[in-house]
Image (cartoon, grey):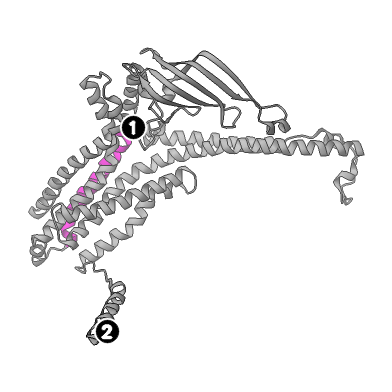
Amino acid sequence: MKLLDKYIVKSFMITFTSVFVILFFIFVLQGIWLFIAELAGKDLDLFTVFKFLSFYAPTIVPMVLPLSVLLASIMTFGSFAENYEFAAMKSSGISLQRAMRMLTVVIFLLSIVSFFFANNVIPKAQYKFLNLRKTIVQQRPAMAIAEGQFNPIGSTINIKVEKKSGDNGEFLEDVTMHIKNVNAGLGANTVIKAKNGVLKSDINSNYLQLELLDGNYYENIIPKKYEDRNKHPFAKSSFKKYILNLDLTKLDNNSADDNDITSEKMLTLSELNYTIDSLQNNYNKDIVSFTDNIVQRNDYVFQLKRDQNIIKEAKVKDLLSIFTLTERQKILEMAKSNISSNEFSINNSKSDLEYKKKNINAHWIVVHEKFVIAFSCLLMFFIGAPLGAIIRKGGIGLPMVFAIIIFITFHFINTFGRKLAQEDSITPFLGMWMSSLVLLPLAVFLTYRATNDIGVMINFDFIVDPFKKIISRFSKKTTKLQ
């Protein structure tokens, strides 16, 4: 490595380290703010709080790392240009491509490290983080439920509490619970409302006991006959004391984090591939099973005609004409019943298949996310380095403005693509790589302009010229009147 390469790499790494450390702590504090609010006043020792933060901190790295590379690149190369160091390099016959060569190798190695970090460190940190949170929830059960909002517990229960009291927040007031019957597939089938409640837990148990006092129990009743379902019958009862056991393993799958931490984020690439293969095979089997179930609904009236000699060559205009009047009535009644039954079955199966498809997409999103983190480091470098050489400004001021604008654009597009992919509106590949595909032309454009000393000049004359003409005409009229 030549002296110039050492100088460039050293300048970049010093800036990158400083920026990364500052942004890391800012994002960590911002990301765990809700958790800090829950941890405060729970008599937890400092070591437990430190472990909580250390297990959560790795999840911030995928957001901090690209921004640090972008800002450090703009600041480093902007400082070189501002201090005429690039001019000295060019006078010595060293181009911008040559100055970026060794640093490109360093960023490439950083991308590889970030991939292994996302594939190995973050899943383990997620696992330990949720297990630690589970332990804290067992010790302080009220932490699992926030005031004034519905808190999901697994995929079947939502609970809302207006107020918590007591040393550990175990006494609840104005409790509302929605319980979904998975087998029925008709949404929230049971609603429980109680004036008061008490949370109890055992540190050696995975279950959280909820004791509800003085309330009412409402349950939708699904009639066996499809025609009676439009009447919406339900059952209501009151109680003085009602006890529910809530599974903490399901509770911990729902985090207050915006990223909605789920089990797929705790898997490595090889584990994800195995899981996706299993989920996809089960999904395909469910589709085939559902299709066969619809097709193979046998009508016994048609079975009666199977063995009768019907001339195949004969043209039958009306299929019902080959049956007797009694058989026709039975066919029409069964056809009507089958249509209603098939419609109900299709709606239920559709929601179930959509849920399973979204689950598969969620796993694919995590797979692509590991590669996007690595690629984003290279992308941000090839945006930041030429941009810094063009604007010729070091320091924190202008580079920070450009870095924030570019990163917000990247993060917004990434979040938008992720949501579309989760809802199965687009493929997970396109959803996760959308931000990179949008900003890649910008990286190519800036690199080309910077390496050819063209610069970036944006002409706003088409906006300014009409106003100039209006002002000019107005000034002439004023002169004439004077």
**Quadrant of the rendered structure where residue 31 is?**
top left
**As rendered, which of 107 and 227 lies closer to the eye?**
227
Please name the amino acid that badge 1 sits on: Pro
Asked if 332 appears above or below 175 in the picture, the reply is below
Asked if 196 appears above or below 299 in the picture, the reply is above
Q: Position of residue 81 (x, y in %)?
A: 12, 61
**Quadrant of the rendered structure where residue 116 is?**
top left
Is 104 left, or right, of 440 in this rendering? left
Residue name at image x 28 percent, y 33 percent? 33
Upstream in sequence: badge 1 or badge 2: 1
Residue 180 has which mark?
A: none
Predominant SS along the magenta part: helix
**As rendered, which of 148 and 480 lies closer to the eye?**
480
Q: Position of residue 306 (x, y in %)?
A: 85, 37
**As rendered, which of 55 and 240 lies closer to the eye?**
240
Q: Position of residue 366 (x, y in %)?
A: 39, 39
Is 422 left, or right, of 411 in this rendering? right
Q: Are marks 1 and 2 in contact (CB under 8 Å)?
A: no
Residue 477 has which mark?
A: 2
Asked if 148 appears above or below 245 in the picture, the reply is below
Identify the element where label 1 is drawn: helix
Residue name at image x 31 percent, y 48 percent? 375
Is 26 left, or right, of 313 in this rendering? left
Is residue 168 shown in magenta? no
| Residues at marks 1 and 2, CA–CA distance in whole angstroms | 73 Å
Q: Position of residue 274 (x, y in %)?
A: 44, 34
Q: Which residues are magenta?
A: 96-123
Please name the amino acid that badge 2 sits on: Lys
Q: Which residue is mark 1?
A: 123
Residue 379 appears in the picture as rendered:
no
**Quadrant of the rendered structure where residue 109 is?**
top left
Identify the element where label 2 is drawn: helix
